Image: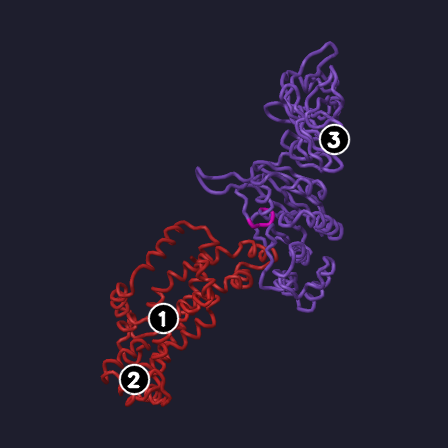
Amino acid sequence: MAFKVRLEGVQKTFGRGTRAVLAVRDLSLEIGEREFFTFVGPSGCGKTTTLRMIAGLETPTAGRIWFGDTDVTALPPQQRDIAMVFQDIALFPYMTVRQNIGYPLRIAGLPKAQVEAKVEKVAATLGLTDKLTQKPGQLSGGQQQRVAIGRALIREPKVLLMDEPLSALDARLRVEMRTEILRLHREISSTIIYVTHDQVEAMTMSTRVAVMDQGRALQVAPPRELFARPADVTVATFIGTPAMNIIPATVVETASGLAIELLGRQTPVAPRHHSALQGLKRVDVGIRPQALRLIPAGPDRPAGRVFLREPLGLEDEMLVEVTDGTRVKVVATATEEFPEGAQVGLAFRPSDLYLFVAESKGTICCGID
Amino acid sequence: MRRCAPLALLLAVLVVVAFPFYWMLLSSFTPREVLFKPPYKLFRLDLSLANYRELLFATEFLTYLRNSLIAAAGAIVLNVIAATLAGYGLTRFAFPGKKGFAFGTLFSYMFPPILMVIPLYILFSALQMRNSYLGLILAHMAISLPLNIWLMWQYFQIVPVSLEEAAWTSGAGRLAALRQVCLPSARPGILSVAIFSFALSWNDFTFAFILQTDRKMFTLPVGLATFVEQTGVHWGMVMAAAVLVSVPTFLLVFFLQRYLLSGLRTAG
């Protein structure tokens, strides 16, 4: 029933001549059957454009899009067996919930009774049974989005496209709907292609994620891999909250081999990474705020001063100013220890350090142990 | 007291505005013999339908009325179709010269009717379209269509494109999406177009006077003018005609003012 969605060197330019904007550049990837695939990235990174090209709402400037063995590049959305949920929900304001959900089937010319039965079924799945006679304007944001999802699901499309469907909702509802969408994905046989700027949504829901920036897919991988082995600095800082600290450091040669001089201390690099570090003097070191621990200040430890401490409940988010002026973010258990202004030492494990090439920002290694 | 002041002002304005209408109504129901005989009373009870009887049965009022209605209906239908499609096209498609078209539209709206009617007279004479409904309707559209296009253009800009895209991704073709999704949302704009087209056509004197030389093709404004010239001035009958002419306009504005206002708000 389902099939693979394949992008082949897809490119999209808006405008002409000197004012042309390259929205998506040379994107190639394959989305598997029944996958929950997410495009994530900052606004303007080309993720929505990519989704709209898959939907047929935009035509690629170059490249091909395949649904299974069919080249759909030039097909209009009506002929693609897709359904889409829009960022602004886009329910038809003059139709009732029943008419909205049933619209795709009415368009397809199904008999009235059959449409009705199907609408009832979808509405029941989404908890909308008692709202069927209302107009979208009478519903809450969450209910409206459920109607929009219902309208997309009713045709049982092979590919379900969702363009930031939760961004119009408030925080609590977003978490609720996230679970709901995940449940739907398990129940239906459609491939879901999802677009969001929220990395938490991307990480929690997807089987695979494409992190996009400036029209390129920086990395396409399952969520855990994105977190553990980011392809470059951009991915590393985009995935995870708060963002990973990036600290400039130097590679030094010691008696026992190579070491990273970081925060006033030398950390040895395991021999298996030596070849990757060959010829590099300066690197960027990434370390997640959760991987840094605060310890009492001591003579042989990287030391600093607690600059800012924000209690978040279970944990505190703090900014530590190291002696050389660098500020790093640390997430620590909430305690009374180390108040603002206190001198602290910073401890970390070599396995938690990510090394990036200083200029190209590409990843050298994840963990130097 | 503070509440009374605006009310008093409103009342004063109402009297000033409404009095002519009242006087028109009263005169139309006043028999010819009484109308100019002192004392002139503000209120009288000796009303009669004589003027109306004379108007309807002794003049060609009904012919004029039919002509006016046909012209107005034609102008409404053609304006709505053309302006809706143009507005949709202008908001949904990119094409070269769009800006020029926009300015051209507004520019052509600036021509006064009297400036266009002579060329139209020559043109329609050559095409043998004088004294035809189509000619008159087209002439009326020359004035009303530019503003109508402008209105629908503005109106379609506030109808979200995502509504149509939702329809397309639901399997609807472009025309189905336009009809089922776009037009219902643009309904207030369409009503504004209809009302404006009607008002312009219904009130037009210039085009009808010059293009329709055959008495059988006169519209109401032109026909009414002949009442003044022919028999001296039969004021009671002229007033009766004026009442009948203003009734449709009044009803239209009264029932549709909500849409009219919302339509103009968007365009402004």
Say if mark 2 contacts mark 3, CB within 8 Å.
no
List the residue tagged with mark 3: A332
From which residue to which does the magenta span run? A53-57
Kindly report which numbered mark, 2 or 3, lies closer to the viewer in this rendering: 2
Name the residue type under label 2. Tyr
List the residue tagged with mark 1: B201
Measured as percent of width and height from the top left, residue A259 is found at: 71, 16
Q: Depth check: B70 or B257 in front? A: B257
Is residue B48 visible from the viewing direction of this image? Answer: no
Establish if B141 lies above or below B240: above
Which residue is at a point 70% across and 45% down the rendered structure image?
A36
Callouts 3 and 1 on one subunit: no
Measured as percent of width and height from the top left, residue B34 is found at: 29, 89
Residue farthest toward the top in the current orientation of the protein: A255
The chain drawn purple is chain what?
A: A
Measured as percent of width and height from the top left, residue A240 is found at: 69, 35
Which quarter of the figure has residue A272?
top right
Which residue is at a point 33% across and 56% down the rendered structure image?
B107
Q: CA distance from mark 1 to mark 2?
A: 36 Å
Q: Is residue B131 left or right of residue B260?
A: left
List the residue tagged with mark 2: B40
The chain drawn red is chain what?
A: B
Name the residue type under label 1. Ser
- State yes or no: residue B234 in magenta: no
Which chain does the residue under circle 2 lie in?
A: B
Kindly report which numbered mark, 1 or 2, lies closer to the viewer in this rendering: 2
Q: CA distance from mark 2 to mark 3?
A: 96 Å
Is residue A217 visible from the viewing direction of this image? Answer: yes
